[in-house]
Amino acid sequence: MNVKEIKNPPKLEDFLISYDILSMTSKIDPNNLPKHIAIIMDGNRRWAAARGLSPGDGHQAGAENLEKIIDHCKDIGVTHLTVYALSTENWRKRSVQEVKGIFNLLLKIVKEKRLEYQKSGIKFFVLGNFQAFPLKVRKAIKKIVDMILDQERLKFNVALNYGGRDEIVTAIQNIIKDGVKPSQVNEELVSKYLYTTGQPDPDLVIRPGGEKRLSNFLLWQTSYAELYFTDILWPDFNPKQLDKAIIWYQQRQRRLGR
Ligand code: FPP
């Protein structure tokens, strides 16, 4: 083929980035992967401010990075990924414009990626109270949540209007509503009443952005998770950084209370 006929020749830079990620990925032990990774996507606004951009641009960059992380999780064999996109506190305290911007990004993902997720085996879930969201957002979420997959490779949970304490309170209310006897209440039963019902607890929680706290994220489910903190801001937390966190996780001795 004549060189001129190649419309989008691969860029050397992209090739080098892929090679760099591959060489880090090759250091991961495939037999000791975290089944479930949970990420607090922190630092979008600081990333944007450092570039003279708006908070919305930061969330946009965060959303683009999220797609790379989803693909990488699926490719290396992680089976569950949960990301914190909007907490109950964010929903109440951020400006209307910022929250609207995050909804628009969510709408874009669920509309534009639906068929791609279906083809590549990504099952979409929402954790949190999204009943208060605009109707068009709820409709789009329902469509992607109800999607049937031939073969599932990754459960992808988006925590939206989510709070860990709120999740536990809602579980208790539903347990009482269902008339469950006190003697029947145990850890297994409580887990069934959480948004993550049926899913394994996260093995690894990652928080980019420099803060070292859980911020009301998966309080019940993270009891035995390994916690990885890094100063890198979320839009820069690329697949190579994820590999580094997994390699760190694989060097931990998980005693799980033993
Ligand atoms: C916290 O960092 C991040 C958020 C409140 C929003 C996260 C949203 C995305 C990554 C994009 C959209 C993804 C979905 C699935 C809708 P911050 O913005 O508070 O940053 P800061 O700590 O620098 O202020």
Image (cartoon, grey):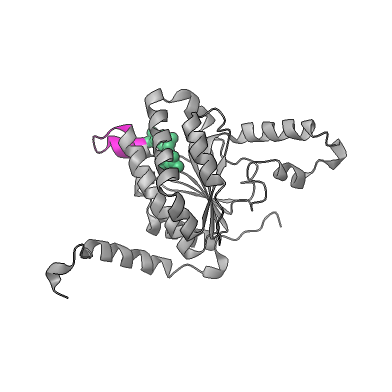
Counting from the top left corner in percent of width and height, residue 249 is at 52, 59
Q: How many marks?
A: 0
Q: Position of residue 239 (x, y in %)?
A: 39, 57
Residue most toward the bottom?
Answer: 1
Q: Is residue 226 visible?
A: yes
Q: Is residue 210 visible?
A: no
- In the image, is 38 to the left or to the right of 27? right
Q: Quadrant of the N terminus?
A: bottom left
User: Can you tell me which quadrant of the image ligand 1 is in?
Assistant: top left
* Left or right of residue 64: residue 206: right
* Residue 146 located within the stretch drawn in magenta: no
Taking the spot 51% from the left edge, 59% from the top edge, the residue there is 121
86 vs 248, nearest the viewer: 86
Q: Is residue 50 magenta?
A: yes
Which quarter shows the C terminus? bottom right
- Considering only vertical position in the picture, is 38 above or below 9? above
Residue 55, given in percent of the width and then of the height, sits at: 33, 33
Q: Which one is in front, 66 or 45? A: 66
Residue at (70, 35) in percent of width and height:
171
Residue drawn at point x = 42 percent, y = 49 percent: 113
Left or right: 112, with 123 as reference point? left
Above-or-below relation of 208 to 35: above
| Residues rendered magenta in the picture | 45-55
